[in-house]
Image (cartoon, rainbow, N blue to C red):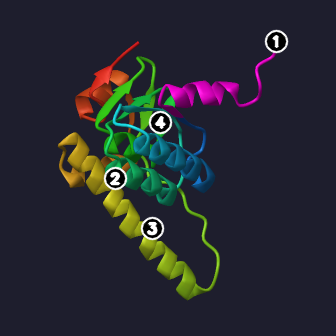
Amino acid sequence: MTPTPGWLQEKLFERRIVFVTGRLDDALAGQAAAQIMTLDASGDDPIDVVLSSADGTLEAAFVLIDVVDAAQAAVRVHCQGQVGGPAIGVAAAADHRSASPHTAFRLSAPASQLSGTADQIAAHSEQQRTLLWRFQARLAKATGRPAEDVADDVRRGRHLDAREALEYGLIDAIRS
């Protein structure tokens, strides 16, 4: 017997597991936010988010950060594969953060492509700077590091393995 297309998704949802994999864009953030909010409304047991996203947008990351912040249930994020750019902010918002031993982290700001009039580009650029500052402040708070150090690491695109991420304060534990 062949499982139905949504079978695995249903089984994970029953176990309160949400996958956030691939580029963190508006669609992925919206889907994961809806799942987290639904699970939060259905009980107090912890919600586990499996995060594997090497890049994305700050706007999408803040959708998930806000949902994690508002959740009454504990939200635990487990990082695997590559986690970078704005997705790191999602991990930082969690109540407990872990990573698989071979997870690679990249502190970086997302690239933006802007179009429009000069005034529109300037306004969007200012909005991106404000979001980036908020993102860096969240990382600084989560890691206990000075905001200036985090900003420098983000500007440089610093890479960390799981052990270095643990020492940096991005995660709380490494688990197999």
State which quadrant residue 106 falls in.
top left
Region rendered in magenta: 1-18
Secondary structure state at the residue bearing disc 4: strand
The reply, left or right, for residue 5 in relation to residue 80 is right
Secondary structure state at the residue bearing disc 2: helix
Q: Percent x, y for residue 1?
A: 82, 12
Amino acid marked by disc 3: Gln
Which of these two is toward me, 80 or 14?
14
Secondary structure state at the residue bearing disc 1: loop
Which of these two is toward me, 97 or 108?
97
> Which tag, 1 or 2, sits closer to the chain's start?
1
> Which tag, 4 or 3, sits closer to the chain's start?
4
Image height check: is 34 above or below 116? above
Question: Mark 4 sits on what residue?
Answer: 83
Q: Can residue 106 be found in the magenta stretch?
A: no
Question: Mark 3 sits on what residue?
Answer: 128
Residue count near mark 2 (Cα–Cα under 10 Å), binned few <14, some 14–19, many ≥20: few
Which of these two is toward me, 171 or 167?
171
Residue count near mark 3 (Cα–Cα under 10 Å), binned few <14, some 14–19, many ≥20: some
